[in-house]
Image: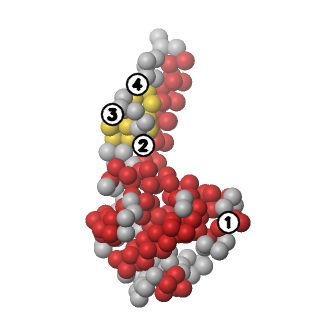
Amino acid sequence: MIGKGWQTKFYSLTLSLLLILSLADRVGANIYIYRDKEGILHFTNLPRHPGYRLYLKTRPDRAPKGVNDWVIKEIALKHGLPPALIKAIIKVESDFDPKAVSPAGALGLMQLKPITAQEVGIQNPFSPVENIEGGVKYLKKMLYQFGSLEKALGAYYLGPDRINDNINRPDVKKYIEKVLYYYQIYKNQF
């Protein structure tokens, strides 16, 4: 007869695996597995050493027509920025919806405000290619102005005039963390 300790471990492992799989499906991340010296299985979407092996390959994000990785890559590389970073910003800003409009009036995939779109020379912020082009130009400007990725992302989110006094605001920190999280996930796609 198997003891209760085994059942608890089995149910705990099963519940953990189901949770990981459900989260992985939502973000389109691959799942890796590693068995340590004690025989404990570790699951992750970001393997930290070569002992991990691919356990489950999940579907990539389903981007709408006209918004695919090669468009993102082409525009990002043209401006010297990592494509995975641009894709992460698009994911967090609009979840790949080229027709997204925020309550603050930001438009399209990279959520450009009309004044920002005008500043970076965008005629149609709902055109995926134009919007990504404008968002990348604006992000590059923020990177140049602030010199660090975190501050540039905060300025992209909040505006360059407001970021210095508000970098530690919870919503700003959460935004930066989300972009950096997806950036790590998308790095292996480019």
* Residue at numbered disc 4: 35
Amino acid on which disc 2 is placed: Asn
Cα distance, mark 3 to mark 2? Answer: 11 Å
Distance from the alpha carbon under mark 3 to that under mark 1: 42 Å
Question: Looking at the picture, how far across and down is residue 129, in whole percent?
Answer: 34, 77
Residue 88 versus residue 10 in the image, above or below: below
> Which of disc 2 and disc 3 is earlier in sequence?
2
Q: Are marks 1 and 2 in contact (CB under 8 Å)?
A: no
Dots 4, 3 in contact, CB < 8 A: no
N-terminal of the pair, mark 1 or mark 4, is: 4
The residue drawn where x is 36% and y is 29% is 51
Residue 45, disc: 2
Residue at horizontal 54%, vertical 62%? 147
Identify the residue under disc 1: 164
- Residue with the mark numbered 3: 53
Specify whether 189 is left or right of 169.
Answer: left
Q: Is tag 2's residue or tag 4's residue first in the polypeptide sequence? A: 4
* Image position, residue 83 (x, y; %): 37, 61
Q: Residue at x 49, y 52 (%)?
A: 181
Name the one closer to the observer, 63 or 182.
Answer: 182
Mark 4 crowdedness (10 Å alpha carbons): few <14, some 14-19, many ≥20: few
- Assign the C terminus to one quadrant of the image: bottom left
Evaluate if marks 2 and 4 touch, with contact meaning CB atoms under 8 Å apart.
no
- Which circle's residue, 3 or 1, is located before the other in the chain? 3
Q: CA distance from mark 1 to mark 4?
A: 45 Å
**Is tag 4's residue or tag 3's residue first in the polypeptide sequence?**
4
Q: Are marks 3 and 2 in contact (CB under 8 Å)?
A: no
Q: Nearer the viewer, mark 1 or mark 4?
A: 1
Viewer-proximal residue among 19 and 99: 99
Q: Is residue 44 above or below residue 172?
A: above
Q: Could you tell me the amino acid type at mark 3?
A: Arg
